[in-house]
Amino acid sequence: MSTFKAPKGTYDLIPPRSAEYLAVREAFAAPLRRAGYGYVETPGFENVELFARGVGESTDIVTKEMYTLTTKGGDELALRPEGTASVLRGALENNLHKAGNLPVKLWYSGSYYRYERPQKGRYRHFSQVGAEAIGTEDPYLDAELIILARDSYRSLGLRNFRILLNSLGDANCRPAYRALLQEHLRGLDLDEDTRRRIDINPLRVLDDKREAVQRQLTGAPLMADHLCAECKAYHERVRELLTAAGVDFEDDPKLVRGLDYYTRTTFEFVHDGLGSQSAVGGGGRYDGLSEMIGGPALPSVGWALGVDRTVLALEAEGVDLQLPAVTQVFGVPLGEEATGELFGLITRLRRDGVAADLAFGGKGLKNAMKSANRSGARYALILGERDLAEGVVQLKELETGGQESVALDRVVAEVQAKLGSLPTR
Ligand code: AMP
Protein backbone atom coordinates (compact mmCIF):
# COMPACT_ATOMS: atom_id res chain seq x y z
CA MET A 1 0.00 0.00 0.00
CA SER A 2 1.21 3.48 -0.79
CA THR A 3 1.73 5.86 2.12
CA PHE A 4 -0.56 8.34 0.39
CA LYS A 5 -4.32 8.24 0.50
CA ALA A 6 -6.92 9.97 -1.66
CA PRO A 7 -7.77 13.29 0.02
CA LYS A 8 -10.65 13.32 2.51
CA GLY A 9 -14.04 13.23 0.81
CA THR A 10 -12.68 11.79 -2.43
CA TYR A 11 -12.36 8.27 -3.76
CA ASP A 12 -10.86 6.47 -6.72
CA LEU A 13 -12.97 4.98 -9.46
CA ILE A 14 -11.56 1.54 -10.06
CA PRO A 15 -12.60 -1.46 -12.14
CA PRO A 16 -15.05 -3.10 -12.26
CA ARG A 17 -17.24 -0.40 -10.65
CA SER A 18 -15.71 2.34 -12.80
CA ALA A 19 -17.46 0.75 -15.80
CA GLU A 20 -20.79 1.64 -14.16
CA TYR A 21 -19.75 5.29 -14.02
CA LEU A 22 -18.92 5.31 -17.70
CA ALA A 23 -22.26 3.65 -18.47
CA VAL A 24 -24.15 6.22 -16.39
CA ARG A 25 -22.38 9.12 -18.10
CA GLU A 26 -23.19 7.60 -21.46
CA ALA A 27 -26.84 7.04 -20.49
CA PHE A 28 -27.10 10.74 -19.58
CA ALA A 29 -25.27 11.92 -22.69
CA ALA A 30 -26.90 9.79 -25.40
CA PRO A 31 -30.40 11.36 -25.17
CA LEU A 32 -28.84 14.84 -25.17
CA ARG A 33 -26.91 14.15 -28.37
CA ARG A 34 -30.11 12.90 -29.94
CA ALA A 35 -31.88 16.10 -28.89
CA GLY A 36 -29.46 18.53 -30.54
CA TYR A 37 -27.18 19.35 -27.61
CA GLY A 38 -23.51 19.92 -28.56
CA TYR A 39 -20.64 18.89 -26.28
CA VAL A 40 -18.83 21.65 -24.42
CA GLU A 41 -15.78 21.46 -22.17
CA THR A 42 -14.66 24.34 -19.99
CA PRO A 43 -11.62 24.62 -17.68
CA GLY A 44 -11.68 22.92 -14.29
CA PHE A 45 -11.09 26.28 -12.62
CA GLU A 46 -12.42 29.78 -13.23
CA ASN A 47 -12.05 33.26 -11.90
CA VAL A 48 -13.53 33.09 -8.40
CA GLU A 49 -15.69 36.13 -9.14
CA LEU A 50 -17.64 34.19 -11.79
CA PHE A 51 -19.04 31.88 -9.12
CA ALA A 52 -19.44 34.60 -6.51
CA ARG A 53 -21.61 36.56 -8.90
CA GLY A 54 -23.13 33.64 -10.76
CA VAL A 55 -23.92 31.15 -8.02
CA GLY A 56 -24.55 33.85 -5.39
CA GLU A 57 -22.47 35.56 -2.69
CA SER A 58 -24.69 34.23 0.08
CA THR A 59 -24.95 30.62 -0.98
CA ASP A 60 -23.27 27.82 0.97
CA ILE A 61 -21.44 26.89 -2.22
CA VAL A 62 -19.70 30.27 -2.40
CA THR A 63 -19.32 31.10 1.29
CA LYS A 64 -18.22 27.71 2.58
CA GLU A 65 -17.62 25.17 -0.12
CA MET A 66 -15.35 26.61 -2.79
CA TYR A 67 -11.77 25.52 -3.25
CA THR A 68 -10.09 28.83 -3.92
CA LEU A 69 -6.48 29.59 -4.72
CA THR A 70 -4.27 32.51 -5.59
CA THR A 71 -1.92 31.80 -8.49
CA LYS A 72 1.72 32.85 -8.54
CA GLY A 73 0.59 35.60 -10.89
CA GLY A 74 -1.94 36.84 -8.33
CA ASP A 75 -5.13 35.60 -10.02
CA GLU A 76 -7.92 34.50 -7.69
CA LEU A 77 -9.27 31.21 -8.99
CA ALA A 78 -11.71 28.58 -7.78
CA LEU A 79 -12.07 24.93 -8.69
CA ARG A 80 -15.49 24.76 -10.32
CA PRO A 81 -18.23 23.86 -7.81
CA GLU A 82 -20.87 23.56 -10.55
CA GLY A 83 -21.18 23.76 -14.32
CA THR A 84 -23.78 26.32 -15.33
CA ALA A 85 -21.84 29.54 -14.66
CA SER A 86 -18.79 28.20 -16.55
CA VAL A 87 -20.82 26.97 -19.52
CA LEU A 88 -22.67 30.27 -19.80
CA ARG A 89 -19.38 32.18 -19.50
CA GLY A 90 -17.96 30.00 -22.28
CA ALA A 91 -21.00 30.50 -24.51
CA LEU A 92 -20.81 34.28 -24.06
CA GLU A 93 -17.04 34.45 -24.54
CA ASN A 94 -17.28 32.44 -27.75
CA ASN A 95 -20.29 34.42 -28.98
CA LEU A 96 -22.37 31.30 -29.44
CA HIS A 97 -25.49 33.32 -28.70
CA LYS A 98 -24.73 35.65 -31.61
CA ALA A 99 -24.76 32.96 -34.29
CA GLY A 100 -28.47 33.61 -34.79
CA ASN A 101 -29.57 30.17 -33.73
CA LEU A 102 -31.15 30.25 -30.30
CA PRO A 103 -31.38 28.35 -28.09
CA VAL A 104 -27.72 27.40 -27.84
CA LYS A 105 -27.96 23.82 -26.60
CA LEU A 106 -24.90 22.45 -24.82
CA TRP A 107 -24.05 19.44 -22.68
CA TYR A 108 -21.04 18.71 -20.52
CA SER A 109 -19.54 16.04 -18.33
CA GLY A 110 -16.83 16.44 -15.73
CA SER A 111 -15.49 16.76 -12.21
CA TYR A 112 -16.78 19.29 -9.68
CA TYR A 113 -15.38 20.27 -6.31
CA ARG A 114 -17.10 21.35 -3.11
CA TYR A 115 -15.56 21.54 0.33
CA GLU A 116 -18.51 19.81 2.01
CA ARG A 117 -18.72 17.60 5.06
CA PRO A 118 -18.16 14.18 3.49
CA GLN A 119 -20.70 11.41 3.95
CA LYS A 120 -22.19 8.68 1.81
CA GLY A 121 -23.33 10.35 -1.42
CA ARG A 122 -21.65 13.65 -0.57
CA TYR A 123 -18.08 14.03 -1.70
CA ARG A 124 -15.57 16.81 -2.18
CA HIS A 125 -14.89 15.67 -5.70
CA PHE A 126 -17.83 14.37 -7.70
CA SER A 127 -18.96 13.94 -11.23
CA GLN A 128 -21.85 15.51 -13.11
CA VAL A 129 -23.34 15.45 -16.56
CA GLY A 130 -25.17 18.65 -17.36
CA ALA A 131 -27.22 20.31 -20.08
CA GLU A 132 -28.03 23.94 -20.77
CA ALA A 133 -30.42 25.50 -23.30
CA ILE A 134 -29.35 29.13 -23.55
CA GLY A 135 -31.17 32.17 -24.89
CA THR A 136 -34.80 31.12 -25.23
CA GLU A 137 -37.78 31.41 -22.94
CA ASP A 138 -40.12 28.61 -23.90
CA PRO A 139 -41.89 26.16 -21.60
CA TYR A 140 -41.26 23.43 -24.17
CA LEU A 141 -37.54 23.72 -23.39
CA ASP A 142 -38.09 23.32 -19.65
CA ALA A 143 -40.24 20.29 -20.40
CA GLU A 144 -37.72 18.90 -22.89
CA LEU A 145 -34.93 18.92 -20.34
CA ILE A 146 -37.01 17.33 -17.59
CA ILE A 147 -38.20 14.63 -20.01
CA LEU A 148 -34.63 13.93 -21.19
CA ALA A 149 -33.34 13.56 -17.64
CA ARG A 150 -36.24 11.37 -16.59
CA ASP A 151 -35.86 9.17 -19.65
CA SER A 152 -32.15 8.69 -19.06
CA TYR A 153 -32.75 7.57 -15.46
CA ARG A 154 -35.39 5.17 -16.76
CA SER A 155 -33.09 3.89 -19.51
CA LEU A 156 -30.65 2.87 -16.79
CA GLY A 157 -33.40 0.88 -15.14
CA LEU A 158 -34.04 3.22 -12.19
CA ARG A 159 -37.61 3.23 -10.91
CA ASN A 160 -37.69 4.62 -7.37
CA PHE A 161 -37.08 8.27 -8.14
CA ARG A 162 -39.45 11.19 -7.96
CA ILE A 163 -39.47 14.53 -9.73
CA LEU A 164 -40.14 17.54 -7.52
CA LEU A 165 -41.30 20.66 -9.34
CA ASN A 166 -41.74 24.28 -8.34
CA SER A 167 -41.72 27.80 -9.76
CA LEU A 168 -39.64 30.50 -8.10
CA GLY A 169 -41.31 33.35 -9.98
CA ASP A 170 -39.35 36.08 -11.72
CA ALA A 171 -38.10 39.64 -11.29
CA ASN A 172 -41.68 40.76 -11.58
CA CYS A 173 -43.31 38.82 -8.77
CA ARG A 174 -40.51 37.51 -6.57
CA PRO A 175 -39.48 40.79 -4.86
CA ALA A 176 -42.94 41.34 -3.36
CA TYR A 177 -43.16 37.71 -2.27
CA ARG A 178 -39.65 37.89 -0.83
CA ALA A 179 -40.61 40.88 1.33
CA LEU A 180 -43.74 39.10 2.50
CA LEU A 181 -41.76 35.99 3.38
CA GLN A 182 -39.14 38.04 5.24
CA GLU A 183 -41.82 39.66 7.32
CA HIS A 184 -43.29 36.28 8.18
CA LEU A 185 -39.93 34.68 8.98
CA ARG A 186 -38.86 37.53 11.24
CA GLY A 187 -41.77 36.65 13.51
CA LEU A 188 -40.46 33.10 14.07
CA ASP A 189 -38.13 31.75 16.72
CA LEU A 190 -34.98 31.15 14.69
CA ASP A 191 -31.25 31.05 15.46
CA GLU A 192 -28.90 33.85 14.53
CA ASP A 193 -27.52 32.25 11.38
CA THR A 194 -30.99 31.64 10.06
CA ARG A 195 -32.04 35.20 10.90
CA ARG A 196 -29.11 36.45 8.86
CA ARG A 197 -30.26 34.27 6.01
CA ILE A 198 -33.69 35.93 6.18
CA ASP A 199 -32.01 39.20 5.22
CA ILE A 200 -29.85 37.78 2.46
CA ASN A 201 -31.88 34.98 0.92
CA PRO A 202 -35.14 34.26 2.76
CA LEU A 203 -36.26 31.63 0.23
CA ARG A 204 -33.45 29.37 1.34
CA VAL A 205 -34.90 29.27 4.87
CA LEU A 206 -37.82 27.30 3.40
CA ASP A 207 -35.33 24.65 2.35
CA ASP A 208 -33.90 24.22 5.87
CA LYS A 209 -33.84 20.50 6.60
CA ARG A 210 -33.99 20.82 10.40
CA GLU A 211 -37.18 19.54 11.97
CA ALA A 212 -37.39 22.44 14.47
CA VAL A 213 -37.29 24.94 11.62
CA GLN A 214 -39.65 23.01 9.35
CA ARG A 215 -42.22 22.81 12.14
CA GLN A 216 -42.40 26.59 12.26
CA LEU A 217 -42.73 26.95 8.53
CA THR A 218 -46.15 25.39 8.12
CA GLY A 219 -47.92 28.76 7.78
CA ALA A 220 -45.22 30.47 5.70
CA PRO A 221 -46.38 32.20 2.50
CA LEU A 222 -45.43 30.20 -0.59
CA MET A 223 -44.23 31.49 -3.95
CA ALA A 224 -46.83 29.31 -5.68
CA ASP A 225 -49.59 31.49 -4.20
CA HIS A 226 -47.88 34.72 -5.26
CA LEU A 227 -46.82 34.11 -8.86
CA CYS A 228 -47.64 36.85 -11.37
CA ALA A 229 -50.00 35.92 -14.21
CA GLU A 230 -47.13 35.29 -16.68
CA CYS A 231 -45.20 33.03 -14.31
CA LYS A 232 -48.35 31.18 -13.38
CA ALA A 233 -49.27 30.56 -17.02
CA TYR A 234 -45.70 29.51 -17.83
CA HIS A 235 -45.63 27.07 -14.95
CA GLU A 236 -49.01 25.63 -15.85
CA ARG A 237 -47.78 25.06 -19.40
CA VAL A 238 -44.66 23.20 -18.17
CA ARG A 239 -46.87 21.03 -15.98
CA GLU A 240 -49.23 20.28 -18.89
CA LEU A 241 -46.35 19.36 -21.19
CA LEU A 242 -44.90 16.97 -18.63
CA THR A 243 -48.26 15.35 -18.06
CA ALA A 244 -48.79 14.98 -21.81
CA ALA A 245 -45.38 13.26 -22.06
CA GLY A 246 -46.38 10.79 -19.36
CA VAL A 247 -43.93 12.23 -16.82
CA ASP A 248 -45.11 12.00 -13.22
CA PHE A 249 -44.05 14.82 -10.93
CA GLU A 250 -44.89 16.22 -7.52
CA ASP A 251 -45.50 19.88 -6.87
CA ASP A 252 -43.14 20.94 -4.10
CA PRO A 253 -43.83 24.56 -3.18
CA LYS A 254 -40.84 24.60 -0.82
CA LEU A 255 -38.28 23.46 -3.39
CA VAL A 256 -35.75 26.28 -3.56
CA ARG A 257 -32.37 24.76 -4.46
CA GLY A 258 -29.04 26.01 -3.19
CA LEU A 259 -28.06 28.36 -5.99
CA ASP A 260 -29.25 31.93 -6.35
CA TYR A 261 -29.66 32.10 -10.09
CA TYR A 262 -32.91 30.20 -10.51
CA THR A 263 -36.11 31.83 -11.76
CA ARG A 264 -39.44 30.21 -12.59
CA THR A 265 -39.10 26.45 -13.17
CA THR A 266 -37.01 24.55 -10.62
CA PHE A 267 -36.91 20.83 -10.25
CA GLU A 268 -35.08 18.09 -8.49
CA PHE A 269 -34.83 14.34 -9.04
CA VAL A 270 -34.78 12.54 -5.70
CA HIS A 271 -34.18 8.88 -5.08
CA ASP A 272 -35.82 7.19 -2.13
CA GLY A 273 -33.06 4.68 -1.47
CA LEU A 274 -30.26 7.12 -0.68
CA GLY A 275 -30.94 8.44 2.80
CA SER A 276 -30.23 12.11 3.42
CA GLN A 277 -28.29 12.76 0.20
CA SER A 278 -31.29 11.91 -1.92
CA ALA A 279 -30.98 14.39 -4.80
CA VAL A 280 -29.64 12.59 -7.85
CA GLY A 281 -30.06 15.58 -10.13
CA GLY A 282 -31.61 18.99 -10.38
CA GLY A 283 -31.91 22.17 -12.29
CA GLY A 284 -34.16 24.92 -13.49
CA ARG A 285 -34.53 28.14 -15.36
CA TYR A 286 -32.01 30.92 -14.82
CA ASP A 287 -33.24 33.89 -16.82
CA GLY A 288 -31.12 36.48 -15.02
CA LEU A 289 -27.76 34.72 -14.84
CA SER A 290 -26.31 36.02 -18.09
CA GLU A 291 -26.83 39.62 -17.02
CA MET A 292 -25.42 38.81 -13.57
CA ILE A 293 -22.13 37.81 -15.17
CA GLY A 294 -22.02 40.76 -17.57
CA GLY A 295 -23.81 39.33 -20.62
CA PRO A 296 -27.00 40.33 -22.43
CA ALA A 297 -30.43 39.09 -21.40
CA LEU A 298 -30.42 35.37 -22.23
CA PRO A 299 -33.21 33.43 -20.60
CA SER A 300 -31.99 29.87 -20.15
CA VAL A 301 -32.75 26.54 -18.54
CA GLY A 302 -30.57 23.61 -17.58
CA TRP A 303 -29.84 20.74 -15.25
CA ALA A 304 -26.99 18.77 -13.74
CA LEU A 305 -27.26 15.08 -12.90
CA GLY A 306 -24.94 13.57 -10.31
CA VAL A 307 -23.08 10.51 -11.58
CA ASP A 308 -21.85 9.29 -8.16
CA ARG A 309 -25.31 9.33 -6.59
CA THR A 310 -26.90 7.75 -9.64
CA VAL A 311 -24.48 4.83 -9.31
CA LEU A 312 -25.46 4.58 -5.62
CA ALA A 313 -29.13 4.69 -6.61
CA LEU A 314 -28.61 1.85 -9.08
CA GLU A 315 -26.94 -0.16 -6.34
CA ALA A 316 -29.75 0.68 -3.89
CA GLU A 317 -32.32 -0.62 -6.37
CA GLY A 318 -30.20 -3.65 -7.21
CA VAL A 319 -30.13 -2.74 -10.90
CA ASP A 320 -27.61 -4.79 -12.85
CA LEU A 321 -26.47 -2.72 -15.80
CA GLN A 322 -25.66 -5.81 -17.91
CA LEU A 323 -22.39 -4.32 -19.04
CA PRO A 324 -20.74 -6.28 -21.84
CA ALA A 325 -17.58 -8.18 -20.84
CA VAL A 326 -14.48 -6.06 -21.12
CA THR A 327 -12.45 -8.94 -22.55
CA GLN A 328 -13.91 -11.46 -24.99
CA VAL A 329 -10.84 -13.55 -25.76
CA PHE A 330 -7.85 -14.28 -23.53
CA GLY A 331 -4.54 -15.66 -24.79
CA VAL A 332 -2.64 -18.28 -22.76
CA PRO A 333 0.83 -18.80 -24.27
CA LEU A 334 3.16 -21.49 -22.99
CA GLY A 335 6.79 -20.72 -23.76
CA GLU A 336 8.72 -17.97 -25.47
CA GLU A 337 7.92 -18.83 -29.06
CA ALA A 338 4.19 -19.34 -28.36
CA THR A 339 4.08 -15.94 -26.65
CA GLY A 340 5.39 -14.24 -29.79
CA GLU A 341 2.89 -16.05 -31.99
CA LEU A 342 -0.09 -15.44 -29.68
CA PHE A 343 0.83 -11.78 -29.18
CA GLY A 344 0.58 -11.42 -32.97
CA LEU A 345 -2.80 -13.20 -33.02
CA ILE A 346 -4.21 -11.10 -30.19
CA THR A 347 -3.03 -7.93 -31.95
CA ARG A 348 -4.85 -9.01 -35.10
CA LEU A 349 -8.03 -9.78 -33.17
CA ARG A 350 -7.90 -6.36 -31.53
CA ARG A 351 -7.42 -4.67 -34.88
CA ASP A 352 -10.51 -6.54 -36.07
CA GLY A 353 -12.53 -5.11 -33.19
CA VAL A 354 -12.42 -8.07 -30.79
CA ALA A 355 -11.71 -7.21 -27.14
CA ALA A 356 -8.71 -9.41 -26.47
CA ASP A 357 -6.00 -9.72 -23.82
CA LEU A 358 -3.32 -12.23 -22.89
CA ALA A 359 -1.25 -13.48 -19.99
CA PHE A 360 1.90 -11.43 -19.46
CA GLY A 361 5.06 -12.13 -17.50
CA GLY A 362 5.71 -15.72 -18.62
CA LYS A 363 2.99 -17.26 -16.41
CA GLY A 364 2.59 -21.01 -16.23
CA LEU A 365 -0.59 -22.72 -17.46
CA LYS A 366 -2.38 -22.73 -14.11
CA ASN A 367 -1.85 -19.04 -13.37
CA ALA A 368 -2.53 -17.99 -16.93
CA MET A 369 -5.86 -19.88 -16.91
CA LYS A 370 -6.73 -18.18 -13.63
CA SER A 371 -6.17 -14.83 -15.34
CA ALA A 372 -8.28 -15.96 -18.28
CA ASN A 373 -11.16 -16.85 -15.97
CA ARG A 374 -10.85 -13.62 -14.02
CA SER A 375 -10.89 -11.54 -17.19
CA GLY A 376 -14.49 -12.52 -17.87
CA ALA A 377 -13.55 -13.64 -21.40
CA ARG A 378 -15.73 -16.14 -23.25
CA TYR A 379 -12.86 -17.89 -24.93
CA ALA A 380 -9.26 -18.70 -24.13
CA LEU A 381 -6.72 -19.28 -26.87
CA ILE A 382 -4.15 -21.71 -25.49
CA LEU A 383 -0.94 -22.13 -27.41
CA GLY A 384 1.75 -24.65 -26.35
CA GLU A 385 4.86 -25.93 -28.06
CA ARG A 386 3.16 -28.99 -29.53
CA ASP A 387 0.30 -26.86 -30.90
CA LEU A 388 2.84 -24.58 -32.46
CA ALA A 389 4.58 -27.49 -34.15
CA GLU A 390 1.22 -28.64 -35.53
CA GLY A 391 0.17 -25.14 -36.61
CA VAL A 392 -2.92 -25.09 -34.37
CA VAL A 393 -4.19 -23.32 -31.26
CA GLN A 394 -6.65 -24.62 -28.65
CA LEU A 395 -9.87 -22.60 -28.58
CA LYS A 396 -11.52 -23.15 -25.23
CA GLU A 397 -14.96 -21.95 -24.20
CA LEU A 398 -14.37 -20.98 -20.59
CA GLU A 399 -17.84 -21.47 -19.25
CA THR A 400 -18.44 -24.95 -20.64
CA GLY A 401 -14.81 -26.11 -20.78
CA GLY A 402 -15.38 -27.30 -24.36
CA GLN A 403 -12.18 -27.18 -26.38
CA GLU A 404 -11.22 -27.60 -30.04
CA SER A 405 -8.07 -27.30 -32.16
CA VAL A 406 -8.20 -24.58 -34.77
CA ALA A 407 -5.58 -23.94 -37.46
CA LEU A 408 -3.53 -20.85 -36.62
CA ASP A 409 -4.34 -19.19 -39.93
CA ARG A 410 -8.09 -19.79 -39.40
CA VAL A 411 -8.43 -18.75 -35.80
CA VAL A 412 -9.19 -15.05 -36.27
CA ALA A 413 -12.08 -15.86 -38.61
CA GLU A 414 -13.26 -18.67 -36.31
CA VAL A 415 -13.28 -16.44 -33.22
CA GLN A 416 -15.10 -13.73 -35.13
CA ALA A 417 -17.73 -16.19 -36.28
CA LYS A 418 -18.21 -17.56 -32.78
CA LEU A 419 -18.52 -14.14 -31.19
CA GLY A 420 -21.00 -13.20 -33.89
CA SER A 421 -22.58 -9.89 -33.15
CA LEU A 422 -21.62 -9.76 -29.48
CA PRO A 423 -21.05 -6.12 -28.72
CA THR A 424 -17.60 -4.79 -27.84
CA ARG A 425 -16.93 -1.60 -25.98
P1 AMP B 1 -26.58 20.83 -7.51
O1 AMP B 1 -25.94 21.70 -8.49
O2 AMP B 1 -26.07 21.04 -6.13
O3 AMP B 1 -28.05 20.73 -7.59
O4 AMP B 1 -26.04 19.39 -7.92
C1 AMP B 1 -26.62 18.61 -8.93
C2 AMP B 1 -26.41 17.15 -8.59
O5 AMP B 1 -25.03 16.88 -8.42
C3 AMP B 1 -27.03 16.74 -7.27
O6 AMP B 1 -28.39 16.38 -7.45
C4 AMP B 1 -26.18 15.58 -6.85
O7 AMP B 1 -26.62 14.39 -7.47
C5 AMP B 1 -24.84 15.94 -7.39
N1 AMP B 1 -23.99 16.51 -6.30
C6 AMP B 1 -23.96 17.78 -5.86
N2 AMP B 1 -23.07 17.91 -4.86
C7 AMP B 1 -22.53 16.70 -4.66
C8 AMP B 1 -21.54 16.17 -3.76
N3 AMP B 1 -20.92 16.94 -2.87
N4 AMP B 1 -21.24 14.85 -3.84
C9 AMP B 1 -21.85 14.05 -4.74
N5 AMP B 1 -22.77 14.49 -5.61
C10 AMP B 1 -23.11 15.79 -5.58
Image: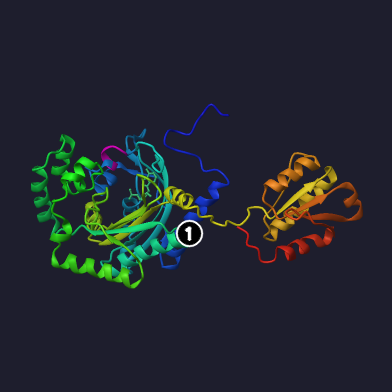
Colouring used for the render: rainbow
| Count of number-bearing discs | 1
Quadrant of res 406: bottom right
Q: Where, by quadrant of the figure, is residue 144 drawn?
A: bottom left
At label 1, the amino acid type is Leu
Which residue is found at the position 55% from the left and 50% from the top?
19
Estimate the x, y position of residue 128 in percent, counting from the top left.
41, 51
Tell me if residue 159 comes above or below residue 382 in the rendering.
Answer: below
Q: Residue at x 48, y 60 (%)?
A: 157
Magenta stretch: residue 58 in it? Answer: no
Residue labelled with disc 1: 156
The residue sitting at the top extreme is 3
Check disc 1 and report its element: helix, strand or loop: loop
Question: 216 and 339: which one is in front?
Answer: 216
What's drawn in magenta, residue-wise?
61-65
Query: What residue is shown at x 41% (from left), y 68% (from top)?
Result: 35
10 horizontally vs 328: left or right = left
Q: Is mark 1 within 8 Å of ligand 1?
A: no
Residue 289 spot, x, y in % from top left: 25, 55
Q: Main secondary structure of the magenta part?
A: helix
Is residue 239 at least partly visible in the picture? yes
Vertical position of residue 146 compared to residue 276: above or below: below
